[in-house]
Amino acid sequence: MTEKSKKLIQEEILNLPKEVQDAINVSNWEKLSEEIGKKYLINEDEVYTFQLETACFLLGLVDEDQYQKNIEDDIGTSKAEAEKITDEVFQKIFNPINNIFIEKIKKSDNVKNANAEQNLNFILSGGDYSAFLDVPPPVEEEGNETVLPVFFIKK
C-alpha cells in the first residue's frame, strides 16, 4: 500500500470512536491483508486494491455483503473465491478486531454508568456495545445512509 493511502486511512481511523481506533491499531490488519491477498491474488495491484477494500470495511464505509461483492468485482475473482477470501479475512482480521473492541467496551468507564436508554439500544441493536459509548450518534443527512463501524462475527 502506498504511503499516501496509509496516511489517508490513518486520518479516517481518527474519526472513529476511541475504542474502535484502539482495536484497529492493535491489529496487524495491513500485513495480514497483504498475506491473504498474496495467497489468493496474482499481482501487486490486486493486493493493493484488496487492502483498500479491507480498509473501507474497517472504516465502516461498506458492509459485509458489499465487501465480498467489491472483492469479486474489483479484483476480478469468482464468487466462490471471493467468499473464501472474505471468510479468511473475517477469521484473521475482522473477528479479532471485533473481539478487542468488545473487550475495550466492556472495560470502559462509560459502560459502568449505563442508563435505561443505553440498555434498550443495546438490546435493539442485537448486542452492539457502541450503544454504551459516550459518543453522540452520527447525524444523518437527508438521503444518505450512515454505516457504523461495528463488526459482526460470522458464524
Image (cartoon, rainbow, N blue to C red):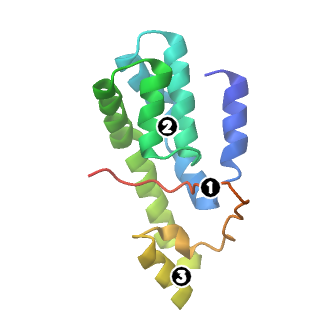
Total marks in image: 3
Query: What is the crowding at mark 1: few (fewer than 14 residues within 10 Å), some, or many (at least 20)?
Result: few
Mark 1 vs mark 2, foreground winner is 1
| Residue 143 horizontal side relative to residue 19, left or right | right
Query: Of callouts 3 and 2, which one flags the residue occurring earlier in the amino acid sequence?
Result: 2
Mark 3 and mark 2: span between their CA atoms?
31 Å
Task: Examine the image and state in which quarter residue 68 appears.
Answer: top left
| Residue annotated with mark 3 | 118
Say which residue appears at 49% left-offset and 28% top-offset: 31
Q: Which mark is residue 145?
A: 1
Say which residue appears at 40% left-offset and 55% top-offset: 152
Say which residue appears at 68% left-offset and 56% top-offset: 143
| Residue 116 horizontal side relative to residue 124, left or right | right
Query: Of callouts 1 and 2, which one flags the residue occurring earlier in the amino acid sequence?
Result: 2
Question: Where does the N terminus fall, quadrant-wise?
Answer: top right
SS type, badge 3: helix
Q: Which mark is residue 28?
A: 2
Mark 1 and mark 3: span between their CA atoms?
22 Å
Q: What's under tag 1, amino acid-wise?
A: Glu
Query: What is the crowding at mark 2: few (fewer than 14 residues within 10 Å), some, or many (at least 20)?
Result: few
Q: Nearer the viewer, residue 90 or 75?
A: 75
Q: Is residue 110 above or below residue 38?
A: below
Mark 1 and mark 2: span between their CA atoms?
29 Å
Pointer 3 with pointer 2, Cβ within 8 A: no
